[in-house]
Amino acid sequence: MRAMQDAEQIVADYLAELLTPVAAAAPEPAADVQVVAIEPWKAAPLGEPIAAGDTRYLLCVAAGVRLAVPMADVTHLLPMPPLSPPNSSNPICLGRWRHPSGEARVADLAAVLSPDMAGAPVSTLVILRDRVWALACVVDDEPVDLLPEAIQWRIGATTRPWLAGMSLEPKCGVVGTTALVQWLEKELGP
């Protein structure tokens, strides 16, 4: 149990470090330049616009780390079903789940965070958007409202591009679903 708490703290510290703005001396603007404050939630990361009504998030837990997935991108939730074997030896891919309209590839959300965390207990399959991808994790809470202005957004991140930001209340990472699916496609192939 102690090792799990240590892993949780390491990941929480890492996520907090990723989301801490770097202090840099900004040059003084020229007299003829108008400085305009940009609200970060209006410039959503990675081209994912945040609609006014899209504030509901599903809180998923993977290896003790809490992540918020936009409910607008969640198609179904179901208890973890048996899976077909994966086509890859990559620990991120747990296998495939057949559903009436096709097949979803199942990613271990803990392994997405870090390959060292692969194999953490899972109880829920979270089916995303067009049912091509699903996330294996633990979901034990009702969806929550996260206001865009309460999220510290990561803009232009090159590491973990699917981590769109961090919410301080509740404390969790916010997943950019489009970026996550693109990352999974790149990591695991079509």
Image: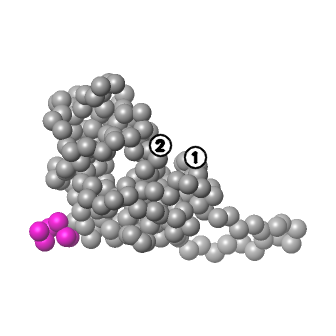
Q: Can residue 123 be seen?
A: yes
Between marks 1 and 2, how big is the CA–CA gap?
9 Å
Q: Eyeballing the image, is 17 above or below 68?
A: below
Earlier residue among tags 1 and 2 = 1
**Labelled pair 1, 2 in contact (Cβ < 8 Å):** yes
Name the quadrant containing residue 87: top left
Magenta residues, dominant SS class:
helix
Q: Which residue is drawn at 83% across and 66% down?
A: 33
Residue at 22% over, 65% down: 7
Q: Position of residue 131 (x, y in %)?
A: 37, 33
Left or right, residue 37 beside residue 167: right
Quadrant occupied by the C terminus: top left
* Picture residue at 18% right of the left edge, 38% below the top: 81
Disc 2, SS:
helix
Residue at the extreme left of the image, as rendered? 1
Mark 2 crowdedness (10 Å alpha carbons): few <14, some 14-19, many ≥20: some
Q: How is the image coloured?
A: one colour
Which quadrant, please, contains the N terminus?
bottom left
* In-image side of 130 versus 79 (left or right): right
State left or right for residue 179 relative to residue 188.
Answer: right
Which disc is residue 47 wearing?
1
- The relative height of residue 47 versus residue 61 in the rendered view (above or below) is above
Residues in magenta, as a range: 1-6
Residue 147, horizontal then vertical, whole percent: 52, 64
Residue 112 highlighted magenta (yes or no): no
* Residue hosting label 2: 178
Q: What residue type is labelled 2?
A: Thr
Residue type indicated by callout 1: Gly
At horizontal 28% and vertical 28% (from top left) the residue drawn is 99
Secondary-structure class at tag 1? helix
